[in-house]
Amino acid sequence: MSLVKLTLRELQERFTRGEVSAFEIVRAYYLRISLVEAKVKAYVTVNDKETVFAEAQALDKELKAWRKTLPLMAMPVAIKDNICTAGMRTTCGSRMLEGYVPPYDATVVQALRAQRCVIIGKTNLDEFAMGSSTEHSAFGPTRNPWKLSHVPGGSSGGSAAAVAADECVAALGSDTGGSIRQPAACCGVVGLKPTYGRVSRYGLVAFASSLDQIGPITKDVMDAAILLNILAGRDPRDSTSADVPVPDFTRAFKKKDVKKLKIGVPVEYFGEGLDAEVREAVQAALEVLEQLGGELQEVSLPHTNVAVATYYLLATAEASSNLARYDGVKYGLRSKHHQDLLEMYCRTRQEGFGPEVKRRIMLGTFALSRGYYEAYYAKAQAVRTLITQDFDTAFQSVDFLITPVMPTPAFRLGEKLDDPLQMYLADIYTLSASLAGIPAIAIPCGFSRQGLPIGIQFMGRPFEEETILRAARAYELATQWRQKRPPIREK
């Protein structure tokens, strides 16, 4: 089998046994990128080939001296381009930061470098992670490897597409309202949003600070657990990171079934607006889980119908505050066309931000403005508490929840660009988990008649990633979806 087709665990095992060198691994991935990247456009920046080849050769020499490996040693990993990487530009998919090179690594990048993995490049995203299709990037859209005329989902569409197209063995994404899970579903890969606070946000360029969370996008559930082992943990540089024990998440796979686990099926997630093919695929998955020993139980999350409105008030309000720092003074773009300071501010933001970012800044500024704060922002915070309480109540009677990831399979490029509301509704099944801060994982569960992947979502109690990893892996092993690969042709 081609090296680029292997999962992270399979590739690492071959490397550990000495069957393949770091140089051979890296060379195979750069060849793959040269053959498909022009079609997929998953990357904003691909690391210099000669530099990475030299790094791989150094790893091979170290391996001979150490005679031992680390879990991610020599593994080619991609990083979403809103996560800071020292010496490599971090654009956030925006003209505002087109030439910005951070002087430091994000905590998660430091963790990867300590594992001696190879950072192969920075992946494309909706500008400042604001979008559901990776069409809002200043550097052009990413395409779905399964059908190049369709979106890969967003905002971590570049990361999901890179993994699906075998342009990296795994990738990091960020999830504010579904931005890991939704593109994973669109591209037929695995996307894990950990519990809020499980993984440090230090070095993640902020969109909505009470919602943002970094997580892995991988080829299978086992790989997601391996990466989470590396990423998770308390970070004193991030006041929101949780001081809780970090287990070995791969131990969740000792049991290969879901016996004695109660599976909640929220009625609100299977109502009007759910595509028939998606409904059929998720219901078939529920039958498999029942055969694996799970006990299905209908539950209610009554405030699901207001999750979209709540999210787009809170997230945009936080975005308007976080993005105020881009004023042309400290770093990033500065307009050359101005006569005074105020005009410089205005022109810099006008030239640097794209239309979707501007829309969300205006929405958030309005929600926080005098006379509207109590009516909108404060009320949304109260509703967020009710949404969290819905999950707390549900988890009193079930161990995890099963839902669709998206109402439909991936839509066509350009199909929703002129209708922001329809674009926002693409995240209707992922927003609530973000608002409640609970862990959730998306994995493949079928395909549409057009050959587009369909995803299923497992949601668990806070800091109980092991439960959803166990259940997702059990389903994955009982089905064949993970073995299917996109039909993209090499040039």
Image: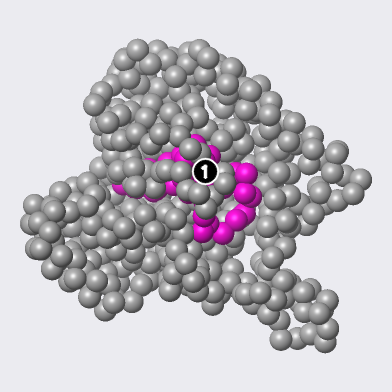
Q: Position of residue 381 (x, y in %)?
A: 73, 36
What SS does tag 1 mark?
Answer: loop
Q: Is residue 61 visible?
A: yes
**Front position in the image: 282 or 459:** 459
Colouring rule applied to residues: one colour
Query: In percent of the image, x 59 and y 68: which residue is there?
Result: 94
Image quadrant in which you'd find residue 246: top left
Query: In percent of the image, x 68 and y 54: which residue is there?
Result: 319
**Front position in the image: 84 or 420:** 84
57 is higher (above) or lower (below) than 10: below
Residue type at numbered disc 1:
Ser
Image quadrant in which you'd find residue 444: top left
Query: In percent of the image, x 70 and y 50: which residue is there?
Result: 318
Q: Position of residue 364 (x, y in %)?
A: 76, 51
The magenta segment: 190-219
Residue 145 appears left or right of 14 = right
Q: Is residue 41 visible?
A: no
Number of other residues with Cα within 10 Å of mark 1, as a class: few under 14, some 14 to 19, many 20 or more: many
218 is higher (above) or lower (below) than 106: above
Q: Position of residue 287 (x, y in %)?
A: 37, 19
**Front position in the image: 354 or 236:** 236
Instruction: Verify whether residue 124 appears in magenta.
Output: no
Q: Position of residue 347 (x, y in %)?
A: 76, 77
43 is higher (above) or lower (below) than 176: below
Name the chief secondary structure element in magenta.
loop
Pointer 1 residue? 241
**Front position in the image: 97 or 424:** 97
Residue furthest to the right in view is 371
Instruction: Verify whether residue 205 appears in magenta.
Output: yes
Residue furthest to the front in view is 236
Residue 401 appears left or right of 309 = left
